[in-house]
Amino acid sequence: MRLVAAAALLSLAATAASATPANYLYASAGALDGLGTLLARSDIDGVQVVYNWKALEPRKDVYDFSAIESDLAATAALGKKLFIQIQDRFFSPDARNVPAYLLSDPEYDGGLVAQVDNAGEGKTGYGWAAMEWNAAVRDRYQMLLSALGARFDGRVFGINLPETSIDIDMKRAAGFSCDGYFAAEMENLAVAAKAFPRSHVVQYVNFWPCEWDNDHRYMERLFAYAAASGVGLGGPDVIPNRKAQMKNAYPFFHQYKGKLSLVAMAVQEPTLTYTNPATGKRFTRDEFVRFADDYLGADIIFWSAASPWLQP
Protein backbone atom coordinates (compact mmCIF):
# COMPACT_ATOMS: atom_id res chain seq x y z
CA MET A 1 0.00 0.00 0.00
CA ARG A 2 1.11 3.57 -0.65
CA LEU A 3 2.26 5.62 2.28
CA VAL A 4 -0.19 8.46 2.86
CA ALA A 5 0.69 11.23 5.27
CA ALA A 6 -0.72 10.47 8.73
CA ALA A 7 -1.72 14.08 9.17
CA ALA A 8 -3.74 13.99 5.98
CA LEU A 9 -5.58 10.85 7.04
CA LEU A 10 -6.35 12.26 10.47
CA SER A 11 -7.59 15.46 8.89
CA LEU A 12 -9.88 13.56 6.56
CA ALA A 13 -11.19 11.48 9.45
CA ALA A 14 -11.93 14.61 11.44
CA THR A 15 -13.97 16.18 8.65
CA ALA A 16 -15.76 12.90 7.98
CA ALA A 17 -16.79 12.72 11.64
CA SER A 18 -18.63 16.02 11.39
CA ALA A 19 -19.98 15.69 7.84
CA THR A 20 -19.89 12.71 5.52
CA PRO A 21 -18.96 13.29 2.77
CA ALA A 22 -16.76 16.34 3.34
CA ASN A 23 -17.68 19.43 1.31
CA TYR A 24 -15.14 20.95 -1.08
CA LEU A 25 -15.68 23.62 -3.70
CA TYR A 26 -14.93 22.97 -7.36
CA ALA A 27 -13.12 25.72 -9.30
CA SER A 28 -13.55 24.76 -12.94
CA ALA A 29 -11.89 27.90 -14.30
CA GLY A 30 -8.62 27.09 -12.58
CA ALA A 31 -8.68 29.99 -10.17
CA LEU A 32 -10.00 30.87 -6.73
CA ASP A 33 -11.18 34.30 -7.85
CA GLY A 34 -14.66 34.92 -6.52
CA LEU A 35 -14.68 31.91 -4.19
CA GLY A 36 -13.21 33.65 -1.15
CA THR A 37 -16.49 34.13 0.72
CA LEU A 38 -17.69 30.60 0.00
CA LEU A 39 -14.32 29.04 0.79
CA ALA A 40 -14.27 30.77 4.18
CA ARG A 41 -17.50 29.05 5.24
CA SER A 42 -17.16 26.69 8.18
CA ASP A 43 -18.97 23.89 6.32
CA ILE A 44 -16.42 23.93 3.46
CA ASP A 45 -13.26 21.89 4.02
CA GLY A 46 -11.30 22.81 0.92
CA VAL A 47 -11.32 23.34 -2.82
CA GLN A 48 -10.46 21.44 -5.98
CA VAL A 49 -8.85 23.59 -8.67
CA VAL A 50 -8.33 22.53 -12.30
CA TYR A 51 -5.02 23.48 -13.93
CA ASN A 52 -4.48 22.89 -17.63
CA TRP A 53 -1.28 21.40 -18.99
CA LYS A 54 -0.38 24.44 -21.12
CA ALA A 55 -0.52 26.82 -18.16
CA LEU A 56 1.75 24.56 -16.10
CA GLU A 57 4.27 23.98 -18.90
CA PRO A 58 4.24 27.09 -21.12
CA ARG A 59 7.40 25.94 -22.91
CA LYS A 60 9.11 22.59 -23.13
CA ASP A 61 10.76 21.74 -19.81
CA VAL A 62 9.82 25.18 -18.44
CA TYR A 63 7.29 24.83 -15.67
CA ASP A 64 5.18 27.56 -14.13
CA PHE A 65 3.59 26.45 -10.88
CA SER A 66 2.92 29.95 -9.60
CA ALA A 67 -0.86 29.53 -9.81
CA ILE A 68 -0.73 26.47 -7.55
CA GLU A 69 1.59 28.27 -5.11
CA SER A 70 -0.83 31.19 -5.00
CA ASP A 71 -3.82 28.93 -4.41
CA LEU A 72 -1.92 27.03 -1.71
CA ALA A 73 -1.19 30.29 0.09
CA ALA A 74 -4.82 31.38 -0.18
CA THR A 75 -6.24 28.10 1.10
CA ALA A 76 -3.68 27.86 3.89
CA ALA A 77 -4.59 31.35 5.05
CA LEU A 78 -8.18 30.16 5.47
CA GLY A 79 -7.22 26.84 7.04
CA LYS A 80 -8.55 24.93 4.01
CA LYS A 81 -7.17 22.08 1.89
CA LEU A 82 -6.24 22.14 -1.78
CA PHE A 83 -6.93 19.38 -4.32
CA ILE A 84 -5.33 19.87 -7.75
CA GLN A 85 -6.63 18.39 -11.02
CA ILE A 86 -4.11 18.25 -13.86
CA GLN A 87 -6.12 18.58 -17.05
CA ASP A 88 -5.10 16.98 -20.34
CA ARG A 89 -8.55 17.03 -22.01
CA PHE A 90 -10.81 19.95 -22.69
CA PHE A 91 -14.46 20.61 -23.47
CA SER A 92 -14.45 23.63 -25.74
CA PRO A 93 -13.48 23.90 -29.44
CA ASP A 94 -11.02 26.69 -28.63
CA ALA A 95 -9.38 24.96 -25.67
CA ARG A 96 -6.23 23.43 -27.15
CA ASN A 97 -4.55 23.74 -23.77
CA VAL A 98 -1.41 21.67 -24.19
CA PRO A 99 2.11 23.06 -24.71
CA ALA A 100 2.72 24.38 -28.23
CA TYR A 101 5.57 21.95 -28.89
CA LEU A 102 3.13 19.03 -28.69
CA LEU A 103 1.14 20.55 -31.54
CA SER A 104 4.09 21.34 -33.80
CA ASP A 105 6.64 18.53 -33.36
CA PRO A 106 5.90 15.49 -35.59
CA GLU A 107 7.09 13.22 -32.77
CA TYR A 108 3.75 13.82 -31.02
CA ASP A 109 1.43 13.17 -34.01
CA GLY A 110 -0.30 16.50 -33.41
CA GLY A 111 -0.52 16.08 -29.64
CA LEU A 112 -4.31 16.48 -29.51
CA VAL A 113 -7.27 14.65 -30.98
CA ALA A 114 -10.70 16.21 -31.42
CA GLN A 115 -13.53 15.19 -29.14
CA VAL A 116 -16.72 14.98 -31.17
CA ASP A 117 -20.41 14.36 -30.70
CA ASN A 118 -21.41 10.99 -32.17
CA ALA A 119 -17.84 10.27 -33.18
CA GLY A 120 -17.46 9.10 -36.75
CA GLU A 121 -20.74 10.62 -37.96
CA GLY A 122 -19.30 13.94 -39.08
CA LYS A 123 -20.61 15.94 -36.15
CA THR A 124 -19.04 19.16 -34.95
CA GLY A 125 -16.13 18.83 -32.54
CA TYR A 126 -16.64 20.15 -29.05
CA GLY A 127 -13.22 19.77 -27.46
CA TRP A 128 -9.84 18.10 -27.41
CA ALA A 129 -7.95 15.33 -25.65
CA ALA A 130 -4.21 14.77 -25.34
CA MET A 131 -3.09 11.64 -27.17
CA GLU A 132 -1.94 9.81 -24.06
CA TRP A 133 -1.66 6.53 -26.01
CA ASN A 134 1.23 8.13 -27.91
CA ALA A 135 4.30 7.18 -25.87
CA ALA A 136 6.04 10.51 -26.55
CA VAL A 137 3.00 12.55 -25.43
CA ARG A 138 2.54 10.34 -22.39
CA ASP A 139 6.19 10.71 -21.41
CA ARG A 140 5.82 14.50 -21.38
CA TYR A 141 2.66 14.35 -19.24
CA GLN A 142 4.39 12.02 -16.81
CA MET A 143 7.34 14.39 -16.58
CA LEU A 144 4.89 17.10 -15.58
CA LEU A 145 3.37 14.85 -12.91
CA SER A 146 6.83 14.06 -11.54
CA ALA A 147 7.79 17.74 -11.45
CA LEU A 148 4.56 18.54 -9.63
CA GLY A 149 5.24 15.79 -7.11
CA ALA A 150 8.75 17.07 -6.43
CA ARG A 151 7.28 20.49 -5.62
CA PHE A 152 3.93 19.76 -4.00
CA ASP A 153 3.87 16.23 -2.54
CA GLY A 154 2.68 16.52 1.04
CA ARG A 155 1.77 20.18 0.55
CA VAL A 156 -1.43 19.68 -1.43
CA PHE A 157 -4.07 17.49 0.14
CA GLY A 158 -4.54 15.58 -3.08
CA ILE A 159 -4.10 15.38 -6.82
CA ASN A 160 -6.57 13.89 -9.25
CA LEU A 161 -6.22 12.85 -12.86
CA PRO A 162 -9.07 13.67 -15.27
CA GLU A 163 -11.94 11.38 -16.16
CA THR A 164 -11.23 8.25 -18.17
CA SER A 165 -13.95 9.02 -20.72
CA ILE A 166 -13.06 10.49 -24.11
CA ASP A 167 -15.30 10.85 -27.17
CA ILE A 168 -13.19 10.62 -30.30
CA ASP A 169 -13.30 9.22 -33.82
CA MET A 170 -11.18 6.18 -33.03
CA LYS A 171 -10.58 5.35 -36.70
CA ARG A 172 -9.00 8.74 -37.33
CA ALA A 173 -7.00 9.06 -34.11
CA ALA A 174 -3.40 8.22 -35.00
CA GLY A 175 -2.18 5.12 -33.19
CA PHE A 176 -5.27 4.75 -31.00
CA SER A 177 -6.36 1.39 -29.65
CA CYS A 178 -8.73 0.58 -26.83
CA ASP A 179 -6.17 -1.49 -24.94
CA GLY A 180 -3.45 1.08 -25.61
CA TYR A 181 -5.54 3.87 -24.12
CA PHE A 182 -6.36 1.82 -21.03
CA ALA A 183 -2.70 0.90 -20.51
CA ALA A 184 -1.66 4.53 -20.93
CA GLU A 185 -4.12 5.78 -18.31
CA MET A 186 -3.07 3.07 -15.87
CA GLU A 187 0.59 3.99 -16.41
CA ASN A 188 -0.15 7.67 -15.75
CA LEU A 189 -1.90 6.72 -12.51
CA ALA A 190 1.09 4.67 -11.36
CA VAL A 191 3.44 7.59 -12.11
CA ALA A 192 1.21 9.99 -10.17
CA ALA A 193 1.13 7.60 -7.20
CA LYS A 194 4.92 7.38 -7.20
CA ALA A 195 5.28 11.16 -7.46
CA PHE A 196 2.84 11.86 -4.60
CA PRO A 197 3.40 9.28 -1.84
CA ARG A 198 2.30 11.73 0.91
CA SER A 199 -0.72 13.31 -0.79
CA HIS A 200 -3.90 11.59 -1.88
CA VAL A 201 -3.92 10.45 -5.50
CA VAL A 202 -7.30 10.03 -7.19
CA GLN A 203 -8.15 8.82 -10.68
CA TYR A 204 -11.46 10.08 -12.02
CA VAL A 205 -13.29 7.21 -13.72
CA ASN A 206 -16.69 7.24 -15.39
CA PHE A 207 -16.51 5.38 -18.72
CA TRP A 208 -13.81 3.67 -20.76
CA PRO A 209 -13.73 4.05 -24.55
CA CYS A 210 -14.88 0.82 -26.23
CA GLU A 211 -16.35 -0.58 -23.00
CA TRP A 212 -19.87 -1.05 -21.72
CA ASP A 213 -20.81 -2.97 -18.59
CA ASN A 214 -17.19 -4.05 -17.99
CA ASP A 215 -17.09 -6.10 -21.20
CA HIS A 216 -13.34 -5.44 -21.59
CA ARG A 217 -12.69 -5.73 -17.84
CA TYR A 218 -11.13 -2.24 -17.84
CA MET A 219 -13.31 -1.05 -14.98
CA GLU A 220 -12.75 -4.23 -13.01
CA ARG A 221 -8.98 -4.01 -13.41
CA LEU A 222 -8.79 -0.33 -12.44
CA PHE A 223 -10.74 -0.82 -9.21
CA ALA A 224 -8.72 -3.90 -8.27
CA TYR A 225 -5.49 -1.98 -8.87
CA ALA A 226 -6.69 1.01 -6.85
CA ALA A 227 -7.69 -1.13 -3.87
CA ALA A 228 -4.39 -3.03 -3.92
CA SER A 229 -2.21 0.05 -4.48
CA GLY A 230 -3.80 2.48 -2.05
CA VAL A 231 -4.81 5.07 -4.64
CA GLY A 232 -8.19 6.73 -4.63
CA LEU A 233 -10.91 6.90 -7.26
CA GLY A 234 -13.65 9.37 -8.03
CA GLY A 235 -15.70 10.88 -10.80
CA PRO A 236 -16.91 14.12 -12.36
CA ASP A 237 -20.62 13.51 -11.70
CA VAL A 238 -22.93 12.30 -8.96
CA ILE A 239 -26.15 11.44 -10.80
CA PRO A 240 -28.24 9.08 -8.67
CA ASN A 241 -29.09 5.81 -10.39
CA ARG A 242 -28.47 7.12 -13.92
CA LYS A 243 -28.50 4.16 -16.32
CA ALA A 244 -25.25 4.88 -18.19
CA GLN A 245 -23.28 5.26 -14.97
CA MET A 246 -24.98 2.23 -13.42
CA LYS A 247 -23.67 0.16 -16.35
CA ASN A 248 -20.14 1.43 -15.86
CA ALA A 249 -18.35 2.93 -12.84
CA TYR A 250 -21.09 3.20 -10.19
CA PRO A 251 -21.53 -0.50 -9.34
CA PHE A 252 -17.79 -0.81 -8.80
CA PHE A 253 -17.77 2.12 -6.39
CA HIS A 254 -20.52 0.30 -4.51
CA GLN A 255 -18.67 -3.02 -4.62
CA TYR A 256 -15.48 -1.39 -3.32
CA LYS A 257 -17.17 0.80 -0.72
CA GLY A 258 -14.82 1.01 2.26
CA LYS A 259 -11.97 -0.66 0.35
CA LEU A 260 -10.47 2.40 -1.38
CA SER A 261 -8.12 4.90 0.26
CA LEU A 262 -10.29 7.83 -0.86
CA VAL A 263 -13.41 8.34 -2.95
CA ALA A 264 -13.90 11.87 -4.26
CA MET A 265 -16.95 12.65 -6.41
CA ALA A 266 -18.07 15.90 -8.01
CA VAL A 267 -21.30 17.80 -8.50
CA GLN A 268 -20.26 20.07 -11.37
CA GLU A 269 -22.33 22.59 -13.31
CA PRO A 270 -23.81 20.07 -15.79
CA THR A 271 -24.66 17.71 -12.93
CA LEU A 272 -26.97 20.34 -11.47
CA THR A 273 -29.19 20.22 -14.57
CA TYR A 274 -30.28 16.59 -14.12
CA THR A 275 -33.75 15.82 -12.82
CA ASN A 276 -34.94 13.07 -10.54
CA PRO A 277 -37.32 10.86 -12.57
CA ALA A 278 -39.31 10.15 -9.42
CA THR A 279 -40.07 13.82 -8.72
CA GLY A 280 -39.64 15.52 -12.08
CA LYS A 281 -37.50 18.11 -10.31
CA ARG A 282 -33.78 18.69 -10.23
CA PHE A 283 -31.90 16.62 -7.71
CA THR A 284 -31.60 18.24 -4.30
CA ARG A 285 -28.49 18.49 -2.19
CA ASP A 286 -29.80 15.77 0.11
CA GLU A 287 -30.40 13.44 -2.84
CA PHE A 288 -26.89 13.99 -4.16
CA VAL A 289 -25.35 13.44 -0.74
CA ARG A 290 -27.42 10.38 0.10
CA PHE A 291 -26.46 8.59 -3.12
CA ALA A 292 -22.81 9.66 -2.90
CA ASP A 293 -22.58 8.47 0.70
CA ASP A 294 -24.80 5.41 0.80
CA TYR A 295 -24.14 3.90 -2.63
CA LEU A 296 -20.82 5.30 -3.87
CA GLY A 297 -19.03 5.53 -0.52
CA ALA A 298 -17.78 9.06 -1.18
CA ASP A 299 -15.44 10.69 1.33
CA ILE A 300 -15.48 14.06 -0.46
CA ILE A 301 -17.88 15.88 -2.77
CA PHE A 302 -16.48 18.68 -4.94
CA TRP A 303 -19.40 21.10 -5.30
CA SER A 304 -19.89 23.61 -8.09
CA ALA A 305 -20.11 27.12 -6.66
CA ALA A 306 -23.41 27.36 -8.55
CA SER A 307 -25.00 24.72 -6.29
CA PRO A 308 -28.23 26.15 -4.87
CA TRP A 309 -27.33 25.35 -1.25
CA LEU A 310 -24.22 27.54 -1.58
CA GLN A 311 -26.16 30.58 -2.72
CA PRO A 312 -26.94 33.47 -0.31
Image: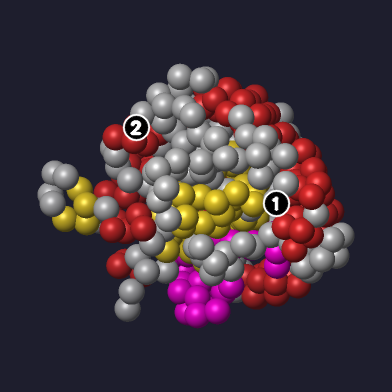
Q: Secondary structure at mark 2?
A: helix
Inspect the magenta stretch and tell me whether residue 54 lies in it. yes
User: Which residue does the image show at 55% across and 35% down from the upper left?
Assistant: 171
Q: Secondary structure at mark 1?
A: loop
First along the sequence among labels 2 and 1: 1
Q: x and y percent of residue 22 in the render?
A: 47, 53
Inspect the image, locate mark 1, and give the three-letter code of the amino acid beneath it: Gly
User: Which residue does the image show at 70% across and 51% down from the upper left?
Assistant: 111
Q: Which mark is residue 66?
A: none
Circle 2 is placed at which residue position?
246
Q: x and y percent of residue 218 in the render?
A: 54, 25
Q: Give the camera-side residue of 162 and 151.
A: 162
Stretch of the chain drawn in magenta: 31-55
Q: Tell me if residue 218 comes above or below residue 116 in the rendering.
A: above
Viewer-nearest of discs 2 and 1? 1
User: Which residue does the image show at 70% across and 64% down from the upper left?
Assistant: 54
Q: Residues within 10 Å of mark 1 (few under 14, many from 20)?
A: some
> Would residue 252 be seen by someone viewing this image from the given angle?
no
Q: Give the camera-side residue of 115 and 312.
A: 115
Inspect the magenta stretch and tell me whether residue 90 lies in it. no
Q: x and y percent of residue 281 in the render?
A: 16, 55
Circle 1 is placed at which residue position?
110
Using residue 146 as the reference point, say whether residue 95 is left or right of it. Answer: left
Inspect the image, locate mark 2, and give the three-letter code of the amino acid beneath it: Met
Q: Could you tell me how far apart the alpha carbons at marks 2 and 1 are, in whole angstroms?
A: 35 Å
